[in-house]
Image (cartoon, rainbow, N blue to C red):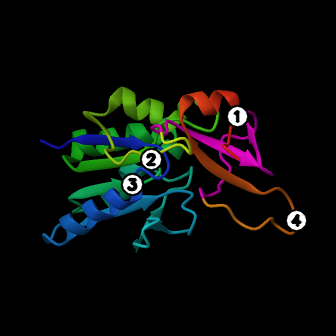
Amino acid sequence: MATLRFSFGTMGSGKSTVALQIHHNLSNRQLFGLLLTTLDREGKQVTSRLGVAAPAVEVTPDVDLYALAVSNWPVHYLVCDEVQFYSVAQCEQLARVVDELEVDVYGFGLLTDFRGELFEGTRRMLEIADEHVPLQVEARCWCGARATHNARVVNGVIVYEGDTVVVGDTNESEAPLFGDSVRYELLCRSHFRTGDLGG
């Protein structure tokens, strides 16, 4: 029986690394599957901060994931990175892939956005997935406590309002020549609430 599994964690918890490992292991068993991503910092591929990467199908808002699976038949599995950015309809399409095509789907995503609220795709996956798997790699706040929040830092200050999707990274980088410097900082709940970056 096929399963819809949703694995989640903060940035830095190894989501993309595990997604790449599952895809690698299954494809090495002569199974054919699709690796999917959306808004990856490197484009049409799944990348891990450990330096591992693989080409992937980019999921844009107009992609019907059920139709994608059917058009690539026979497909044995789907590995979906960044599912927090999928629409409710696309999450439903993944469930349909599992139920009607009997194809295993492995979804990976962030639990909450920079405001500490569930993403639309995350909420739907939590509602419909057969399995919910918190990732075991615990990212840490600057204070050493378990990081539970992905804080958005714009020009050195935590922000709590703005567009839900703004692509950035967890690394400090040089100030851009034009526009705002946007990055994400992993924080515990307490330091997220107080806006303390430990500087």
Q: Which residue is mark 4?
A: 178
Q: Which residues are magenta?
A: 145-170
Q: Which residue is mark 3?
A: 14
Q: State if disc 3 and disc 1 touch (CB < 8 Å).
A: no
Residue 14 quadrant: bottom left
Q: State if disc 1 and disc 2 touch (CB < 8 Å).
A: no
Whichever of callouts 3 and 2 sits on the residue coming sooner in the sequence is 3
Q: Secondary structure at mark 1?
A: loop
Taking the image as shown, residue 119 lies to the left or right of residue 156, namely left
Within 10 angstroms of label 4, few (less than 14), some, or many (20 or more) residues?
few
Whichever of callouts 2 and 1 sits on the residue coming sooner in the sequence is 2
Q: Is residue 100 above or below residue 30?
A: above
Q: CA distance from mark 4 to mark 2?
A: 31 Å
Q: What residue is shown at x 63% (from left), y 50% (from top)? A: 184
Q: Amino acid at mark 1?
A: Gly
User: Which is in the foreground here, disc 3 or disc 2?
Assistant: 2
Q: Which residue is mark 2?
A: 139
The N terminus sits in image quarter: top left
Q: Which residue is mark 1?
A: 195
Q: What residue is shown at x 28% (from left), y 41% (from top)? A: 5
